[in-house]
Image: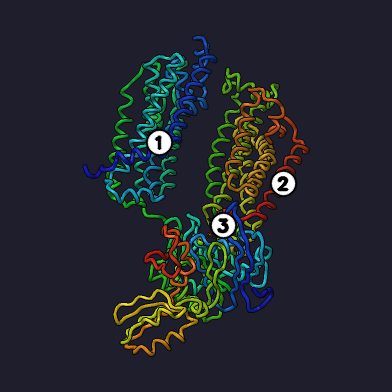
Amino acid sequence: MVSSLGDMTTAISVSDLVKTFGDTRALDGLDLTVRVGEVHGLLGPNGSGKSTTIRILLGLLRKDSGEVRLLGGDPWRDGVALHRRLAYVPGDVNLWPNLSGGEAIELLGRLRGGLDAQRRADLLERFDLDPTKKCRTYSKGNRQKVAIVAAFASNVELLVLDEPTSGLDPLMETVFRGYITELKQAGRTALLSSHILAEVEALCDRVSIIRAGRTVESGTLDDLRHLTRTTISVEASRPFDGLRKLSGVHDLVVDGPRATFEVDVSVLDPVLRHLADLGVQTLTSAPPTLEELFLRHYGEELAALNGNNHVSSGNNRTPGGGR
Amino acid sequence: MTGFAGTLALTRLALRLDRIRLPIWLLALATMAAASAGSIADLYPTESDRLGYATTTAVNVVARAFNGTLSSPSLGAIVMVEIFTFLSLFAALLSTQTVVRHTRLEEETGRAEMIGSSVVGRFASLTAALLVMAGTNLALAALIALALVANGLAVTGSLAAGAAIGTAGMAFGALAAVAAQVMEGSRAANGTAATIIGAAFLLRATGDALGDVADNGTEVTSAWPAWLSPFGWAVQARPFSDERWAAFVPLGLLIVAAVVGASLLSGRRDVGSGLLRTSRGPAAAPRSLRNPLGLAWRLQRGVLIGWSVAVIVLSVSYGAVANEINTVVGDNEQMRELMNQLGGSENLVKGYLAFIMVIFGLVVSGYAVQSLQRLRGEEAGGPLESVLATAVSRPAWLGSHLTCALLGATWLLALSGAGAGLAYGLIVDDPAYQTATMLRAGLVQLPAVAVIVGFAVAAFGLVPQRSIALAWSAFAVSVVVVYLGPLLDLPQWTMDISPFTHLPAVPVDAITAKPLLVLSAVGVALGVIGFAAFRRRDLRL
Ligand SMILES: Nc1ncnc2c1ncn2[C@@H]1O[C@H](COP(=O)(O)OP(=O)(O)O)[C@@H](O)[C@H]1O
Ligand SMILES: [Mg+2]
């Protein structure tokens, strides 16, 4: 990884980060770069180290080794100064049972250095949150809304969001996405962790996929798509015999004049040339969803979970196997 | 009867959840009864000893308020009057907490909802909680009766004594079931139940304190406030005198009425909420809530107010009886020994005043430990993660809670000294001097409290997961050393473990700077260790 310490265009840079809890190696050489002005997705299944990474970035946990820079500073040493410039929504929001939601929002805002009253009012309305209720009576989703309102109402450069929508219903998720889009337009930066692919796909400019404490892929969604296969369904007048011999074609299923297969993006061109000679009548191609990217990386794990150790990752499209 | 479906399963579940808690409580209370019965038999072996006890306690207002009235100068009756207040208070607390735990607390943890979705009737959880509570009190009554019989007391009287305590417990348990339907959550329900218990105790104490002494000099007729209290009804069973079983009728009626009331109310509320609407708060934060200190004060002030009330009541009552110390201590050799060791024998009143200030030192340490327990509470189950991700440094957050704990402790010590001094001063007609002296005697405890506080902070920094248990252990060791040290003749090094051992016994001794400075230094050093360790470590969520 290119060292980008002190670089003004880099909001977060992490390299070779290691963190152990006793025998558990939660982070095992993790890399992460978040540029200023982007919404970056930190994608991985439960237990892959997302929250641990974020907590080290916030100086709540101490790293074992590796490089960590946040907004040009060291989060362990310069925490207080850096925290004025960011807002954090924890994965599991816990509040003070005896404070009202409104009090908690304002308190968190003030501790961060102030918040915009008008924005706060808008957010309360759009998230449909009653600020006069005691925090004790809030559901998980409502506690999450308190943290989200407090974060979005602060005027900060960077938002750090750990699975921010895990307790929100679909309607509120849409509201949340609206605010992220707004924030992106305002040129602010966000790091958003998730194990929900659709969310990352909808919101993020760039993604880092982590697994067992390591970064396995990182880049824009387009970059990552190059790494994977496109699914093609085709109907043609001539037989598909030649297709089987082409390298880069996988999982071919022929049903009379119809065929479905996957193809490595790198060999798309020769495969399409081949198809052109077969008298194509209909053709649909589907770019891989993040779901597929994800399954490719966690295929082995899923196969092991399903008690099916010999299935290659390409065949392992078990419905319901994704998270 | 479908409303009761699943009651048996829920009862079994409740018993399983309580399989350690309840037996420990029952054994502890029964052991208390047995130990008291044994020691009282030793203390008052002859008829004339007992008559002496009866005549001195009958005219002693404080003894009447704390223990209640003696029904006759028999050994059994003396045992009853000595154990009743303590055991019935604990039976009541155990019962109310059991009921609230298996109704509202279960709902809050979500377990009840999970069970509620299977075949469980509307009344099942309430009925199960009441069954467990009633069974606990039956067992307690039986164990107490057994403990008394084992000490050679009459069977009928022992049964009546056990029944009086068990029935009183049941009555408060049933009242707690009503509170559980009405109040907004388990904490509020427990608080209400504890308030009812406290009020019932005060009514009984006031009634007995205001009672009339009969011509024979031993019998006391309680004044009317005692008749408003279930505790007052229970003692009317007069165990070991002329057992009056009819005294259980009003208690029985109260239990039935409360159970019926709770069942009717339970049909009118939703799972997870009480009949009273949840209280609301302001939509915006007050100005005071804008920094870590404001937050710490907001979180701690309720606890401090509660302790302040308790300390005022205790210190004024302790101070008010100082001048009657000879009758209060009476023939109790242990108490005399304890105060002589602390205060020296040449002036028993001063010794007593010095002794109660050590007690307040311990009480205030209890407050400080409870207050600092919040450190771990905020970290483990709470919002510390969010707070430390704002522009609040770890030392600032820890320092804010520490400031509240120390200022609160100082305030409570001042209050206890001033309260005892003022009450005693008014009685001996020297309020200004006594208040000033005792204020100092109270504040002298602060360095010892600071050691406990420092220890709690160090434990929080070094071993957060064990910090609450460790801090309470330090408190418990101090209590044991103060109370039992002189009696058990513990070796000096054991005594020295407790910071309170090193304090000058004001007002018997003059205030000397050296021990206070040394203790303060130890407290500060422990605190510094705690801060340094907390700065360095991971948050343990
Ligand atoms: N305080 C801790 N003590 C021990 N193990 C931990 C602790 N926090 C996290 N872990 C472990 O580290 C791994 C990563 O956890 P986490 O960062 O919470 O994952 P994620 O947020 O991606 O679900 C998991 O295996 C988890 O069990
Ligand atoms: Mg997580």
Q: Residue at label 1?
A: B95
Q: Amino acid at mark 2?
A: Val
* Same subunit: marks 3 and 2: yes
Q: CA distance from mark 3 to mark 2?
A: 24 Å
Distance of label 3 from label 1 (alpha carbons): 34 Å
Q: Given the image, on which type of amino acid does mark 1 rest?
A: Ser
Q: Secondary structure at mark 3?
A: helix
Q: In the image, A170: left or right of B416? A: left
The reply to the same-chain question for discs 3 and 1 is yes
Q: Earlier in the sequence, mark 1 or mark 2?
A: 1
Q: Which of labels 3 and 1 is toward the front?
A: 3
Q: Position of residue B454 (x, y in %)?
A: 67, 45
Q: Which residue is mark 2?
A: B524
- Residue B179's label in the rendered image is none
Q: Sequence-wise, which precedes: disc 3 or disc 1?
A: 1
Q: Chain of mark 2?
A: B
Q: Nearer the viewer, residue B415 or A256?
A: A256
Q: Disc 3 designates what residue? A: B384
Measured from the top left, where is residue B395 in percent x and y? 66, 56
